[in-house]
Image (cartoon, grey):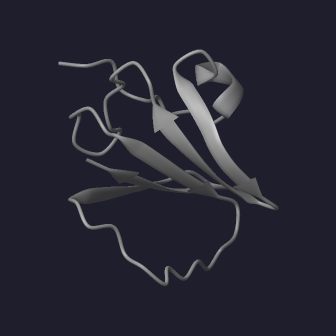
Amino acid sequence: MAERLDLSDGFDVHDYRSRLKLQTQDGSSMYLENREGLGCPACGRPFERLFVSEDDRVTFGNPPDAPFCLARTREKLLLLTH
């Protein structure tokens, strides 16, 4: 099983900077690509993309067209697509 993102002390993208590639960043949100098969903190399976937001509310105009998981820390919401 793949090494999971560890959210026990929150999520800091800099802890995974060599494994995640920043795709876009806008204010308090970012999209990242999983370059090394890190495991999802919710289900353990490798994920393809990661959306991270510090906003307490997020609206998606186009929902993911693949299975996804949600995870949360005190400060961030994470959406992981598989």
The residue under the point 17% across, 18% down is 1
Left/right of residue 63 with respect to residue 13 in the rendered view: left
The residue depicted at 67 percent of the width and 33 percent of the height is 12
Q: Is residue 27 above or below residue 58?
A: above
Q: Position of residue 79 (x, y in %)?
A: 43, 57
Residue 78's place in the image compared with 21, above or below, is below
**Residue at horizontal 58 percent and vertical 77 percent from the top:** 58
Report the residue at 39% width, 18% height from top.
36
Nearer to us in this view, 6 or 79: 79
Residue 80 visible in rendering: yes
User: In the drawing, does residue 38 fall left or right of residue 31?
Assistant: left
Residue 2 as seen in the image, left or right of residue 35: left
Q: Position of residue 64 (x, y in %)?
A: 33, 67
Please provide percent x and percent y for residue 53: 64, 60
Q: Position of residue 41 (x, y in %)?
A: 35, 39
Towards the viewer: 41 or 58: 58
